[in-house]
């Protein structure tokens, strides 16, 4: 496993460097050709002397949580054009001058209309596979809606946290900006049991195993997004899958299911600020 991971890192770096070389043949200052040096990890302009270095774009990706204790659920979203039934954690590029935590709040708000409070950094992963980019660094995080604890915790601990959501009565928060024809066409709130099935379905999809088609919403794309019935939501969750173990979204979801890292019960999201997590990848 360690050997395969090391080889994957080498291939990721090679692909990113090749893309960077192809897109950096001319100087961005004077427009003259650049040349490669230092074994291909740098380029320089012979005309004006400008040095060019490989570029990495940073992307924040988050497991958004709502609820406490056994009622806690994780939100996954679906974009149009993805394979039938595929959902994943929400993500977006980190803007200049923006922290990863700020990006999570902005992207979740822009894509779904949902407000999230505390954000915890969990793990990172290089991602050289995005078409048209130089290479990305995925910054994985956990985000909590107001009143949500990051860990499953105990009922007593949740009840004692200021502003904590009560257990036993789970209600999906509004996501008014998600709907047909939009960037995020639908969202699902997965229980740990449903998330575990989606993880297994994602692994099966990655090895080419056949799977049933997911139902499509029958909503007019021009109309406001309507709340799906509980039965329809349960059916969609049962047929959904998430990315396999090649993607950080897989590990975010799996670590939430298992209560590892920032998803452990000793991390309180009720009213707290941002803090760094631990990297597993």
Image: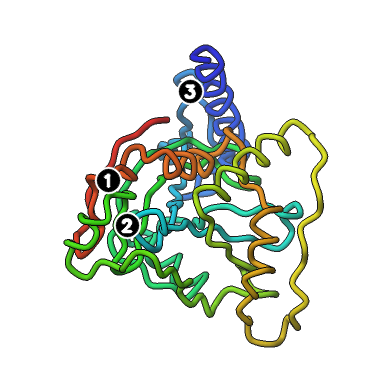
Query: What is the CA distance from the residue labelled 3 to the residue labelled 2?
Result: 36 Å
The residue drawn where x is 42% and y is 59% is 71
**Residue under numbered circle 3:** 37
Query: What is the CA distance from the residue labelled 1 to the residue labelled 3?
Result: 50 Å
Q: Are marks 1 and 3 in contact (CB under 8 Å)?
A: no
User: What label does residue 188 carry, if any?
Assistant: none
Q: Earlier in the sequence, mark 1 or mark 3?
A: 3
Q: Give percent across and percent down for residue 51.
A: 41, 36
Q: Give percent across and percent down for residue 126.
A: 48, 35
**Residue under numbered circle 2:** 101
The answer to which image quadrant residue 185 occupies is bottom right
Q: Residue furthest top?
A: 3
Disc 3 on helix, strand or loop?
Answer: strand
Q: Quadrant of the C terminus?
A: top left
The residue drawn where x is 74% and y is 31% is 207
97 in relation to 194, above or below:
below
The residue drawn where x is 31% and y is 62% is 148
Q: Are marks 3 and 2 in contact (CB under 8 Å)?
A: no
Apparent side of residue 165 relative to residue 221 in the rendered image (left or right): left
User: What label does residue 265 carry, if any?
Assistant: 1
Number of callouts: 3
Q: Earlier in the sequence, mark 3 or mark 2?
A: 3
Q: Are marks 2 and 1 in contact (CB under 8 Å)?
A: no
The residue drawn where x is 55% and y is 31% is 17
Query: What is the CA distance from the residue labelled 2 to the residue labelled 1?
Result: 20 Å
Q: Residue furthest bottom?
A: 223
Disc 2 packing (10 Å; few <14; some 14–19; many ≥20): many
Disc 1 on helix, strand or loop?
Answer: loop
Q: Earlier in the sequence, mark 2 or mark 1?
A: 2
Q: Give percent across and percent down for residue 136.
A: 50, 42
């Amino acid at each position: 496993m360690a050997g395969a991971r090391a080889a994957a890192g080498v291939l990721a770096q090679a692909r990113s460097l090749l893309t960077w070389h192809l897109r950096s043949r001319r100087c961005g200052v004077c427009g003259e050709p650049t040349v490669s040096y230092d074994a291909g990890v740098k380029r320089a302009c012979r005309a004006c002397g400008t040095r060019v270095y490989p570029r990495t774009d940073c992307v924040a990706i988050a497991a958004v949580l709502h609820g406490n204790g056994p009622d806690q659920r994780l939100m996954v979203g679906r974009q149009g054009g993805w394979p039938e039934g595929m959902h994943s954690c929400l993500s977006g590029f980190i803007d200049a001058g923006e922290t990863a935590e700020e990006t999570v709040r902005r992207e979740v708000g822009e894509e779904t209309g949902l407000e999230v409070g505390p954000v915890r950094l969990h793990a990172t992963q290089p991602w050289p596979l995005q078409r048209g980019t130089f290479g990305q660094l995925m910054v994985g995080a956990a985000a909590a809606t107001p009143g949500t604890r990051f860990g499953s915790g105990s009922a007593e601990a949740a009840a004692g946290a200021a502003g904590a959501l009560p257990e036993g009565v789970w209600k999906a928060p509004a996501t008014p900006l998600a709907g047909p024809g939009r960037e995020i066409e639908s969202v699902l709130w997965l229980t740990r049991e449903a998330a575990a099935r989606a993880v297994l379905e994602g692994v099966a999809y990655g090895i080419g195993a056949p799977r049933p088609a997911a139902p499509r919403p029958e909503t007019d794309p021009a109309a406001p997004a309507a709340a799906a019935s509980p039965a329809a939501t349960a059916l969609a969750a049962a047929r959904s899958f998430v990315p396999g173990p090649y993607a950080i979204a897989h590990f975010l979801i799996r670590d939430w299911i298992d209560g590892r890292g920032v998803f452990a019960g000793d991390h309180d999201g009720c009213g707290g600020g941002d803090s760094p997590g631990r990297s597993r990848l």
